[in-house]
Amino acid sequence: MLHSVSAVFIFAAAAVPIYLSFKLKNTLRKLSLALSIFIVIHGFYHLFGSLGFDFLADSVFEPASAAALLAFGALYLAAGKRREKRHVSAS
């Protein structure tokens, strides 16, 4: 039951970054798209967990969710470093 409720709320929460990924440009678009991918994969983890596909949820979607979150973090750090580098060179 908890997986079902979580899946509904997670997919609803994914609507905002998905919308932003269509409206934004450049780095922010990439970041919001990466965040959207993480949220959707994590939603599938909860969806398949609620349907009783525990092996698929735990062995496929949980690690994929963690990998997507790490990829988002790497993109975020890279974007921050690029912004910092531009800020320093502009001064």
Image: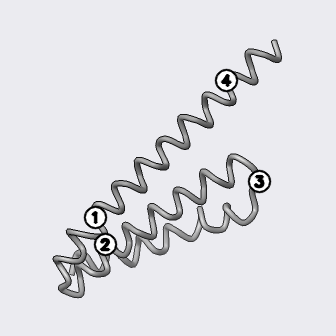
Q: Secondary structure at mark 3?
A: loop
**Measured from the top left, where is residue 7 in percent x and y?**
35, 76
**CB contact under 8 Å: marks 1 and 2:** yes
10 and 54: which is toward the camera: 54
**Which numbered tag is attached to residue 62?**
1
Residue at figure coordinates x 36%, y 61% from the top left: 65
Q: CA–CA distance between discs 3 and 2?
A: 29 Å
Q: CA–CA distance between discs 4 and 2?
A: 36 Å
Q: Which residue is mark 2?
A: 45
42 and 16: which is toward the camera: 42
**CB contact under 8 Å: marks 1 and 4:** no
Q: Amino acid at mark 2?
A: Tyr
Q: Residues within 10 Å of mark 4 (few under 14, many from 20)?
A: few
- First along the sequence among labels 3 and 1: 3
- First along the sequence among labels 1 and 2: 2
- First along the sequence among labels 4 and 3: 3
Name the residue furthest top.
91
Q: Secondary structure at mark 1?
A: helix
Q: Amino acid at mark 3?
A: Lys
Residue at figure coordinates x 67%, y 30% from the top left: 82
Q: CA–CA distance between discs 4 and 3?
A: 19 Å
